[in-house]
Image (spheres, helix red, strand yellow):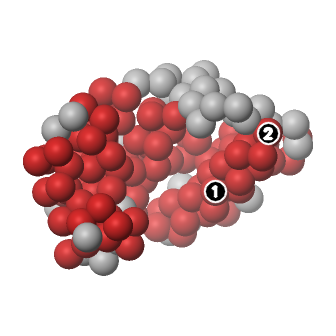
Amino acid sequence: MPSMQDPSFDPARKVHWCRDIFLLVDRLNQSTAESPTGPVRIEDPQLLRLTQIAVPTILAIASPQPPPNPAPPHIAEAIYLRATLESSGAFPEDVPLNPRIAFRDYEQAARSGFAQAWFKLGRDYEGFGDDKHARTCFERGVKAGVESCLYVCI
């Protein structure tokens, strides 16, 4: 954990660490939550402390100033993770629930090379009833090797 707070520590490794923390929170929350959106309840004080480091870390990495063009892979993934926080409202004190901004972030992550974001974009387009754009996103995901996009394109 001290490495995560060290500004000189490899940012790509920080993103991977944060992703793992969020996956653990998701796994624990799936067994207790009634809804996939809304604030998560974390009763374990150690996990709560880890999330209190992970959320600001992702927000900082996802918003470099000035933004690089093209974005390195770890920044694209950080943008994707920020979008998942925006779309879920899991940590509203740090990242308010905002599907519209999440959609933009998913799009930015996908266009920056984080291929898993194509699936989220496709699902959002499906939700809007825009099957043409949804299919395009899923096809782009398939071309990039995203398995979750495959079932839709068959």
Residue 16 in picture, x, y percent from top left: 55, 65
Which residue shows up at 18% across the image and 65% down it? 140
Q: Residue 74 or 81: which is nearer the viewer?
A: 81
Q: Residue furthest front?
A: 154
Q: Which residue is mark 1?
A: 23
Whether residue 53 is visible here, answered yes or no, is yes
Which residue shows up at 88% across the image and 43% down it? 44
Is 72 above or below relative to 82?
Answer: below
C-alpha distance separating marks 2 and 1: 15 Å
Residue 136 in picture, x, y percent from top left: 14, 57
Which residue shows up at 71% across the image and 53% down it? 27
Whether residue 5 is visible here, answered yes or no, is no
Position of 86 with respect to 40 (left or right) is left
Q: Amino acid at mark 1?
A: Leu
Residue 38 in picture, x, y percent from top left: 60, 26
Query: Mark 1, residues whose alpha carbon is within 10 Å: few (<14), some, or many (≥20)?
Result: few
Q: Secondary structure at mark 2?
A: helix
Q: Amino acid at mark 2?
A: Thr
Question: Which image quarter is the N terminus in?
Answer: bottom right
Q: Residue 34 or 45: which is nearer the viewer?
A: 34
Q: Which residue is mark 2?
A: 32
Question: Which image quarter is the C terminus in?
Answer: bottom left
Position of 148 with respect to 37 (left or right) is left
Between disc 2 and disc 1, whose residue precedes?
1
Which residue shows up at 16% across the image and 38% down it? 130
Q: Secondary structure at mark 1?
A: helix
Residue 86 numbered mark, or none? none
Is 131 above or below relative to 100?
Answer: below
